[in-house]
Amino acid sequence: MEKTALTPKTHTTPPARFSHGVRKGNILQVAGQVGFLPAEEGEPPTPAGPTLREQTLQTLDNVRSVLEEGGARWDDVMMLRVHLTDVDHFAEMNDLYNAYFEGQSLTGPPAARTTVYVGLPPGLLIEIDALAVLDSPRVA
């Protein structure tokens, strides 16, 4: 089975040797996404804004873009990992997360989730990665 790199049109080339997402068969892994606004190739990435709200909503949209590039949707996601830079942001992030997924029309149970606290480059407050399992492998 071939492993395919996923880079949505809204994403620039990663800053190191990794893929925004990879799919092999029916498994799709989304690399940690941050709250950068969509950008043209060659343009520097720009954060959605300085607030946790702006960055969280953009980060979730960026994860969704990689999922969709690989033929997945939120209902295919088994696990989300949320990386926060500040423990004091947990309650606000949780409220934003809940509101976001209320609007996603999930047809099955929500994904499992883990939240950890990390260091990120200056100005970035949140990073999210995802693991999805699709019903069947991609047919070429």
Image (spheres, helix red, strand yellow):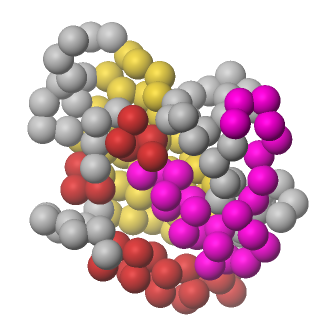
At a point 78% along the width and 73% down the height, the residue shown is 50
At a point 42% along the width and 52% down the height, the residue shown is 64
Give coordinates of residue 65: x percent, y percent: 45, 46
Give coordinates of residue 51: x percent, y percent: 73, 78
Q: Quadrant of residue 138?
A: top left
15 relative to 54 in the view: left or right: right
Q: Quadrant of residue 128?
A: bottom right
- Residue 122 visible in the shown view: yes
Question: Is residue 14 on the magenta stretch?
Answer: no
Q: Nearer the viewer, residue 123 or 79?
A: 123
Give coordinates of residue 14: x percent, y percent: 68, 32
Above or below, comparing residue 53 to residue 140 in the picture:
below
At a point 27% along the width and 11% down the height, the residue shown is 1
At a point 41% along the width and 19% down the height, the residue shown is 4
Above or below, comparing residue 60 to residue 133 in the picture:
below
- Residue 83 visible in the shown view: no
Q: Which residues, given as a range, are shown in magenta?
A: 40-64
Question: Is residue 61 on the magenta stretch?
Answer: yes
Quadrant in which the C terminus is drawn: top left
Above or below, comparing residue 116 to residue 137 in the picture:
below
Give coordinates of residue 139: x percent, y percent: 17, 17
94 relative to 27 in the view: left or right: right
57 relative to 105 in the view: left or right: right
